[in-house]
């Protein structure tokens, strides 16, 4: 029996020595020391031994068992160390290599200009209003004093979606939308920045999609001088204290009187250059006193209330501000263009 145990030990140690994975060791342990293994069998047969033999064999059996266990433990440790070594070699990290530069985001130049314009008007007590880009014919034209056969509709080539709905050609429809919410009561002081769409052929100065910022003030006793003072402050704030503005008579169906507003050229200081086409002035917006029909249709009494409105193009402001020569740069999303701008 003693020989059998020694042979078993030899066999087990050999198997342990040859194991290449931790899993092999576990199998070996189950095979030799497990409940159904040969060791258990030997120990079970102890009952049949004589009283002198029993302690001797018992001791040998214990020695064999612990020799196998120790061999398994040692082998397991060395296999785990080997495995760790292999992993470390595969996953080496060279901390001396240069890092990957993080891409930093840049604000779009139109966002910069629009936020600056918003800040100015918010500081003057205006709130920001919004309206849908898919607009009804009523708000885009009719409520702005442009009935279906009005010739001014032709100046804004539209993308119609159905007979009744179109992509708004201007942010002006936010005027009647905002007025209606007032139930005929002032004051109302809003600006509305947003996208507008026109069926134009894209070139350096035209884009079928561009931005506008609408402004409107309604209250008792609002006069043309309020409009002029507001726009003068705005021009100086945006383009420098030395700037002047000039108002030229113009026509818009929703304002009467209507004006076009120019600022003195910030590039040549009014001397005349290619940007201002040698005139010393640059047109920046359209404006006027809100037409009584527009007030009436939106529920205001023109005998009691008056107001002014204006509409400007942030694309043009951004082009002037940053010396951008082609409006299409704003909408083609070339990352090299955007990356030049920072707050
Ligand atoms: N909506 C006009 C346009 O797109 C711009 C404009 C002119 C807006 C005069 C106004 C205004 O509010 O009073 O050409």
Image (cartoon, rainbow, N blue to C red):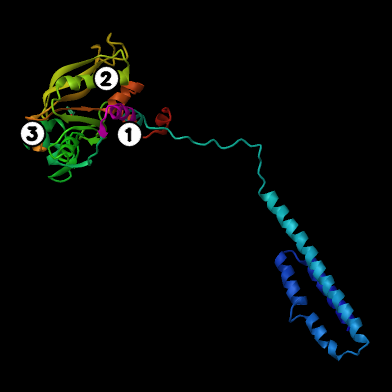
Q: Which residues are magenta?
A: 115-127
Q: Which residue is mark 1?
A: 331
Q: CA distance from mark 1 to mark 3?
A: 42 Å
Give how far across and how far down residue 110 sits, in percent.
33, 30
Mark 1 neighbour class, 10 Å CA radius: few under 14, some 14 to 19, many 20 or more: few
Q: Residue at x 76, y 80 (%)?
A: 37
Identify the image quadrant of residue 320.
top left
Closest to the observer, 128 or 11: 128
> Is residue 283 in view from this perspective?
no
Q: Quadrant of the N terminus?
A: bottom right
Q: In this image, 146 relative to 120: left or right?
A: left
Disc nearer the start of the sequence (1/2) = 2
The percent position of residue 323, horizontal first and vertical second, equals: 35, 21
Task: Identify the residue at horizontal 13%, vertical 23% (top origin).
Answer: 258
CB contact under 8 Å: marks 3 and 2: no
Q: Which residue is mark 3?
A: 301
Residue 336, position in %: x, y?
42, 30
Instruction: Write down the residue under mark 2.
Output: 233
- Secondary element under disc 2, as helix, strand or loop, is helix
């Amino acid at each position: 029996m003693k020989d059998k145990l020694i042979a078993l030990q030899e066999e087990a140690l050999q198997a342990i020595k040859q194991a290449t994975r931790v899993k092999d060791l576990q199998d070996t342990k189950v095979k030799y020391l497990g409940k159904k293994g040969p060791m258990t069998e030997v120990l079970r047969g102890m009952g049949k031994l004589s009283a002198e033999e029993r302690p001797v064999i018992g001791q040998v059996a214990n020695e064999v068992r612990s020799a196998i266990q120790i061999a398994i433990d040692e082998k397991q440790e060395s296999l785990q160390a080997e495995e760790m070594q292999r992993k470390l070699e595969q996953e080496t990290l060279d901390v001396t290599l240069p890092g990957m530069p993080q891409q930093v985001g840049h604000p779009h130049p139109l966002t910069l200009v629009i936020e600056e314009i918003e800040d100015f008007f918010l500081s003057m007590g205006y709130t920001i209003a919004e309206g849908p880009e898919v607009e009804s014919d009523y708000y885009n034209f009719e409520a702005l004093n442009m009935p279906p056969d009005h010739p001014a509709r032709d100046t804004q080539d539209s993308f119609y979606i159905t007979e009744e709905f179109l992509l708004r050609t201007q942010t002006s429809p936010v005027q009647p939308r905002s007025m209606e919410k007032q139930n005929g009561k002032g004051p109302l002081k809003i600006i509305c920045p947003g996208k507008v769409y026109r069926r134009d052929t894209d070139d350096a100065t035209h884009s079928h999609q561009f931005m506008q910022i609408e402004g409107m003030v309604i209250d008792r006793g609002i006069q043309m001088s309020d409009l002029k003072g507001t726009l003068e402050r705005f021009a100086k704030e945006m383009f420098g204290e030395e700037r002047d503005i000039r108002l030229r008579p113009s026509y818009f169906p929703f304002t009467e009187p209507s004006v076009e507003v120019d600022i003195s050229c910030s590039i040549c200081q009014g001397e005349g250059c290619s940007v201002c086409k040698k005139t010393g002035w640059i047109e920046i917006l359209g404006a006027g006193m809100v037409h009584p029909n527009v007030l009436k249709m939106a529920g205001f009494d023109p005998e009691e209330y008056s107001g002014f409105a204006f509409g400007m193009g942030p694309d043009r402001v951004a082009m002037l501000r940053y010396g951008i020569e082609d409006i299409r740069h704003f909408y083609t999303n070339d990352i090299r263009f955007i990356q030049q701008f920072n707050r």
